[in-house]
Image: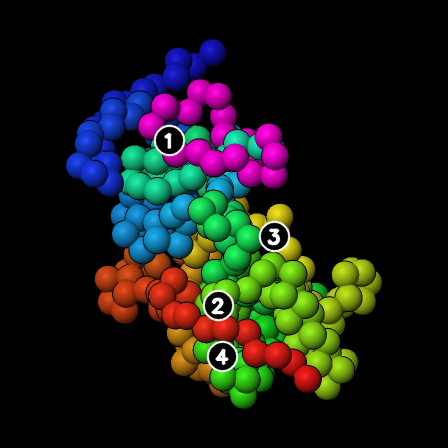
């Protein structure tokens, strides 16, 4: 049996305190198709931390872990593991479930070292779990529909929201679809879920051949499934800038609405297929197109 390799590093915390972390098996390949190692995963999360951490801060974290890489078995980990360092923040969720809260760089690197490739969070923070800070539409294409069809529906959804006085941001799912998020305040998960379902139903009624809100998979073929149920208070959505467990290290990457429009206009189906190196380059060039989801304060209108 191969001996586990370990490397100790010191990482500054949010308040300047130094956390000693022991990283293991950094040379293990987690994305075999492109020889992307655990060291590369840790490096990506460390470098993307300035824009990622604001989107997960004070939110209970569900980790999806691939200890043997994306070709091996995976598991969801909601409960913060008992071996977590004492300085990892936690929160009690849904009664007796204690979940990790990733608020700073040492915490994020610790999670990355667990081969937690995907980071999923709730729409509300642990400090105010009754009031989500955003409403999300998960646009999931059913083959043969794909990213171009998602772009078309996302732009139509954006137009509907603007007519209601609401601004939205958009990111790739990192898989095959898009997430449209509406920053909101002073409402409940039930209200956001009802609002998303009503808007989705309106879009599906107008375009029944292209859009569905039906959960049944057989009704999604060739259509965009507009998943309104992601707004349930107990559900999570992959975080902005999280890696995804695909053959290559794709990212749930924030994009601009101009990029969505350009992708649809040009028919370039790979234009929004962004991996870790591409995302790091984009951040240096354009910053965080998803930042409005943290700072904008909007209230849901009443649908007639």
Left or right of 102: which side holds 1?
Answer: right
Name the residue at 48% across, 50% down.
128
Name the residue at 36% across, 23% down.
86
Magenta stretch secondary structure, dominant: loop
Q: Do the residues labelled 4 and 3 touch (CB within 8 Å)?
A: no
Mark 1 element type: loop
The foreground one among 182 and 48 is 182
Q: Can you give x and y, in whole percent of width and height, for residue 269 in the image?
A: 52, 72
- Of labels 4 and 1, earlier in sequence is 1
Which residue is labeled 2 in the image? 184
Q: Are marks 2 and 3 in contact (CB under 8 Å)?
A: no
Q: Residues within 10 Å of mark 4 (few under 14, many from 20)?
A: some
- Of labels 4 and 2, earlier in sequence is 4
Spatial CA distance of label 4 from label 3 is 21 Å
The foreground one among 181 and 67 is 181
Which residue is labeled 4 in the image? 166
Left or right of 184: which side holds 54?
Answer: left
| Span highlighted in magenta in the image | 78-96
Q: Residues within 10 Å of mark 1 (few under 14, many from 20)?
A: some
């Amino acid at each position: 049996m191969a001996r586990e390799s370990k490397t100790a590093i010191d990482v500054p915390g949010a308040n300047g305190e130094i956390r000693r972390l022991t990283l293991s098996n950094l040379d293990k390949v987690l994305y075999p198709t492109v020889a992307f190692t655990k060291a590369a995963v840790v490096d990506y999360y460390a470098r993307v931390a300035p824009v990622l951490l604001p989107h997960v801060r004070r939110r209970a974290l569900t980790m999806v872990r691939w200890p043997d890489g994306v070709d091996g078995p995976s598991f969801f980990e909601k409960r913060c593991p008992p071996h977590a360092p004492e300085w990892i923040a936690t929160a009690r969720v849904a009664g007796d479930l204690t979940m990790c809260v990733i608020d700073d760089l040492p915490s994020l690197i610790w999670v990355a070292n667990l081969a937690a490739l995907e980071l999923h969070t709730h729409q509300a923070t642990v400090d105010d779990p009754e009031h989500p800070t955003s409403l999300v539409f998960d646009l999931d294409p059913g083959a043969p529909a794909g990213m171009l069809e998602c772009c078309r529906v996302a732009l139509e959804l954006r137009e509907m929201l603007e007519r209601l006085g609401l601004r939205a941001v958009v990111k790739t799912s990192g898989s095959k679809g898009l997430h449209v998020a509406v920053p909101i305040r002073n409402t409940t998960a039930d209200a956001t879920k009802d609002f998303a379902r009503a808007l989705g139903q309106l879009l599906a009624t107008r375009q029944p051949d292209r859009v569905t809100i039906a959960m049944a998979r057989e009704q999604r073929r060739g259509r965009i499934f507009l998943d309104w149920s992601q707004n349930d208070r107990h559900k999570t959505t992959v975080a902005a800038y999280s890696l995804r467990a695909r053959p290559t290290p794709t990212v749930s990457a924030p994009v601009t609405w101009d990029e969505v429009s350009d992708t649809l206009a040009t028919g370039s189906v790979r234009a929004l297929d962004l991996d870790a190196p591409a995302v790091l380059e984009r951040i240096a060039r354009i910053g965080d197109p998803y930042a409005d989801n943290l700072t904008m304060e909007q209230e849901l209108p009443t649908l007639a």
